[in-house]
Image (cartoon, helix red, strand yellow):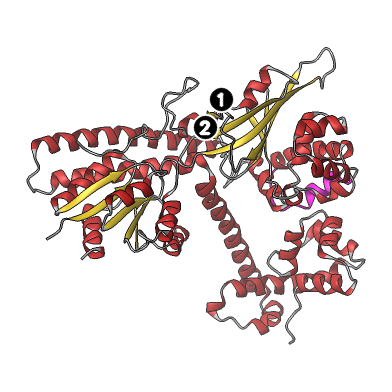
Amino acid sequence: MPKSVLAGTRIRDLRTGRGMRQIALAATCGISPSYLNLIEHNRRRIGGALLNRIADALETDPSALSGGAAATMTSALDAAAEAHRDTRPERDRADELVSRFPGWARLIEAQYSEARRLEQIVERLDDRLTHDPFLSASIHTVLSNVTAIRSASAILASGEKVEPEWQARFHRNIYEDSQRLADATETLVEYLDAEDNEGHSGSLPQEDVEYWLTDRNWVVTELEADPGADIEAIVKGSDHLGSDAARHIARQFLRQYAADVFAVPSVPLKEAVAETLDPIRIATRLGVSLPTIFRRLSTLDADLPGDGMPFGLVGCDGSGTLVFRKPIAGFDLPRYGGACPLWPLFQALRQPMTPLQHVLEVSGRDERRFQTCAVSELGHPGGLSGPVVVTGWMLITPMAQIPDHVVSQPVGTSCRICPEADCMARREPTVFLPRYTSGGLP
Amino acid sequence: MDERRVLLIEDEPNIIEAIRFILSRDGWRVDTHSDGNTAMDAVLRRGPDLIILDVMLPNKSGYDILNDLRAGDDTREIPVLMLTARGQKKDRELAEKLGADKFMTKPFSNGEILATVREMVG
C-alpha cells in the first residue's frame, strides 16, 4: 500500500499550488504563521474547527485535507513513529495497521497523544522553573542552604580535628542555614499549594493566554487587518486556551485589542513611531489615551525603527493585582502574589490620568535599568451609579545606557525574591540571604 | 613549593566558609570574592591557579564572568570550576560552550569538590 500523505503536507501542497503565502493563510484562519508552519510540517495534529477553516480558506473540502478518518489515524501513527524512530516501526505499512488492526492503531494513537500531553505539561513546568522568578529563587535558596548544611555537617562529622572556634562557627552556620531552609521550604510549599488549589495542570488561565500570545508574538493579525474580525473564531482556533477561564480572559483581551486597533490602526501608529518613541507625544499626536498607546506599542516589537528596543507592558486592576503581563528580558514579572510596591504602576493608581515617567534599576542578581511610563485610567462600566473602576498600565523599555544626570529608582520583582534588605516598602521577608560583601573570613 | 591559590567567587557566606575550610586544610590558599561586577578585578589582582565560580552572583552572572575570563589575555588559561543550583543539560552545555573546565551542581559533597579541585590543578 502506498504511504499516506499527511494532512500538513496536503495543506502545504494545496496552499503553494494556489500561490498563497503562509502568513496570509494563517491570518485568514486566525492562527499564527509559526503555528501553521508546525501544522504544515506535520508537527501539530489538526482537526475540528481549524481544519474546517483551513479547508474554507483553501476552497476545498475538509476531508480532502484530512483524507478521512483512516488517513487521520495514519497521520497520528506516523507522528508517533517519527517520535520513536529508534524502535524502527514499519512506517510504510501504517495504512495496513489501521485497516487490519484498528483497535491497536487507536491504542497507539491514544498513548502517543497522552505522552504528548504529558510532555507539554513537563515543558511548561520546566519553562516555569526557568522563567518563574519566584520558583527559581526559592529553589536556588533551598539548594544553597542544603549545600552549606551538608558541607558544614560533613566537616564536623568527619572525625578529623576541628578547632573549637571553627566548630562553633559551623554549628552556628548549620543552625542559621537550617532556619533559612525551613523558611524557604515552607514558602515553596505554600506557593505550590496555591497552584494545586487553582485546579490546573501546569499553568493558570492567565498564563495560558500569555502562552497563546507569545506564540503569536503578541500580535493578533486578524484584528490588525480588521478590528471587526470574529473574536470567537480567533479564540476557538487556539490550542492554548484550554479552559473556560482562559477563553474568557482571551475574549476580554481581544475586545480591548480590537478597540485599540480601531482607535489607532497600524499605519498611523507606525508613522508616529517613525518620528518618536515617546508614548506621551504619540498619544497627543493621535488624540487617544495613553493606555491605548501603551497597548499598541507593545505589539510593535518586530517593527520598531532603527535600533529601537521592544516594549514590555504590565497592567493591574485597582487592587494592584497584575492582570496583564507582557514580559521583557531582565524585568521579571511575578506570577503569584504582589509585585514590588515601589513600581510606578501602583503610584499611578493614586494619581489617575497623570503619567509618571521613571528610570528603574531592578535589584537582583543582574541589575538592569529600564525607562518606564505609568498611568491609570478611570472607568464607569456601571454608569454614574456604579463603582469607579481604575486600571493601571506601565510601559517598560530597557535602557542600554543611562545619562549621568538621571537618577534611577531601585525596585524589585516582589518582596520574597528581592535582596534589598533595607527597603522601607518591604511587606514580607526575602527568601534570599542578606546581601553579602566580599572579604571572607577574618 | 609555591602555595596553590584558589579564588572562590560565591556569594553565600556559609558555603564560602565550608569550602574555604576544606581547601585550606588541604593546603590551598583560598581567596574569596562575592560581587559579580568586580570579579574580574579580583581575578587579576589575586592571580589564582584555579577559580571556583558560582553562576548566580549579585550584579553579574557567573556565565558573563566566565565569558570575560575567556576573552582576557591574562585569564583565559585559568581553570574554572562552575557551581550552580541548576544542573540541567542546557546549563551544563552553556558552561562548556563558554569555556568552563568543570561543572558541579549544588548540593555537592566536600569530597567531590576536593577531588575535583585536586584533579584540575594536579
Q: Residue A377 lies in what quarter of the image?
A: top right
Q: Amino acid at mark 2?
A: Gly
Front-lying residue, B109 or B22: B22
Question: Residue A401 vs residue A427: left or right?
Answer: right
Report if residue A320 is visible in the image. no
Q: Secondary structure at mark 1?
A: loop
User: Which range of residues does the magenta coloring cover?
Assistant: A229-243
> Which quarter of the rendered picture does the N terminus of chain B lie within?
bottom left
Label ID, residue A412 = 2
Q: Is A305 within the magenta?
A: no
Task: Note whether A355 is above or below A271 in the view shown.
Answer: above
Task: Note whether A194 is above or below A113 in the view shown.
Answer: above
Q: Amino acid at mark 1?
A: Leu
Residue placed farthest to the top in the image?
A: A385
Sequence-first disc among 2 and 1: 1
CB of mark 2 within 8 Å of CB of mark 1? yes
The residue carrying pointer 2 sits among few (fewer than 14), some (14 to 19) or many (20 or more) residues within 10 Å by Cα, namely many
Q: Secondary structure at mark 2?
A: loop
Question: Residue A82 vs residue B37: left or right?
Answer: right
Task: Note whether A31 is above or below A172 in the view shown.
Answer: below
Determine the residue positioned at 13% across, 37% down: A167
Report the residue marked by disc 1. Answer: A342
Report if residue A360 is visible in the image. yes
Number of on-image labels: 2
Q: Position of residue A131 (x, y in %)?
A: 54, 46
